[in-house]
Image (cartoon, rainbow, N blue to C red):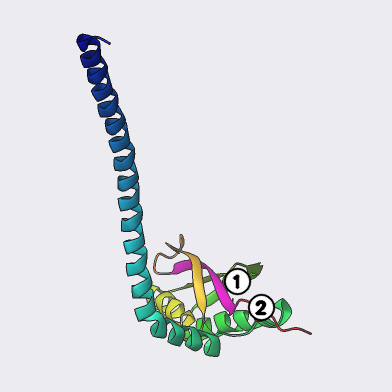
Amino acid sequence: MKRSEKRLLGAFGLVVFALVNLFGFRILREKKDAADIEAGQLRDQIGLLSLEEAERDLWLKRRAWMESRQPAFTDETTEAPKLEGAVTNAANLAGVSVDSLKPVALESTDNFDKIGIVAAVSGSNEEVVRFLSLLQTRDGFRTMDSFELKPDKKDPAIVKCAIVLSQLYAKGSVAQN
């Protein structure tokens, strides 16, 4: 081989070496960036798990409180009249008149079972507000899925209120016969 061919071969070797290093560097850089992203995600998960561990006792206490107080579901024929009675009692105490009551069928979700009632009442603004507050008790486990307030067309001093009230029961608390 001539001297110029050896130089040309050496230069070609250097170019090939530089290209291999460039591609290798890019591949390693992409892997490092992916590892940095994964490390950040893992740090975030560790922080979240640490927070959950710190709050574990609080949530266990809340769970125990709910399990000790949330009512057990027996069947619709027993529970629906109880809910209707609660609505009627609240209406009587608040001084509103009950225009209609209609039960809503049992609904089951991942977290709870519930029955409901659609109630229409009317009375003064103060009476309706008192009625709504009487339905919500600390240990009642009730939700107002919807409510609508509007004045009576004949007497604007009277407020018509339509609500969908649900009673929540602990999931899996269905009594077995």
- Residue 23: image quadrant is top left
- Give how far across and how far down residue 8 sits, in percent: 23, 13
**Which residue sits at x=39%, y=73%?**
125
Q: Quadrant of the C terminus?
A: bottom right
Name the magenta segment's main secondary structure: strand
Q: Is residue 175 magenta?
A: no
Q: Which residues are magenta?
A: 158-170
- Residue 13: image quadrant is top left
Alpha-carbon neighbours of circle 1 within 10 Å: few (<14), some, or many (≥20)? many
* Viewer-nearest residue: 109 or 87: 109
Count every numbered label the image shows and give the total: 2
Asked if residue 81 is positioned above or below residue 42 in the image, the reply reads below
Q: Earlier in the sequence, mark 2 or mark 1?
A: 2
- Mark identifier at residue 20: none
Q: Is residue 167 magenta?
A: yes
Q: Mark 1 = which residue?
A: 117
Q: Quadrant of the N terminus?
A: top left
**Which residue sits at x=22%, y=19%?**
11
Residue type, numbered disc 2:
Ala
List the single residue furthest toward the front.
1
Q: Mark 2 = which residue?
A: 80
**Which residue sits at x=49%, y=83%?**
63
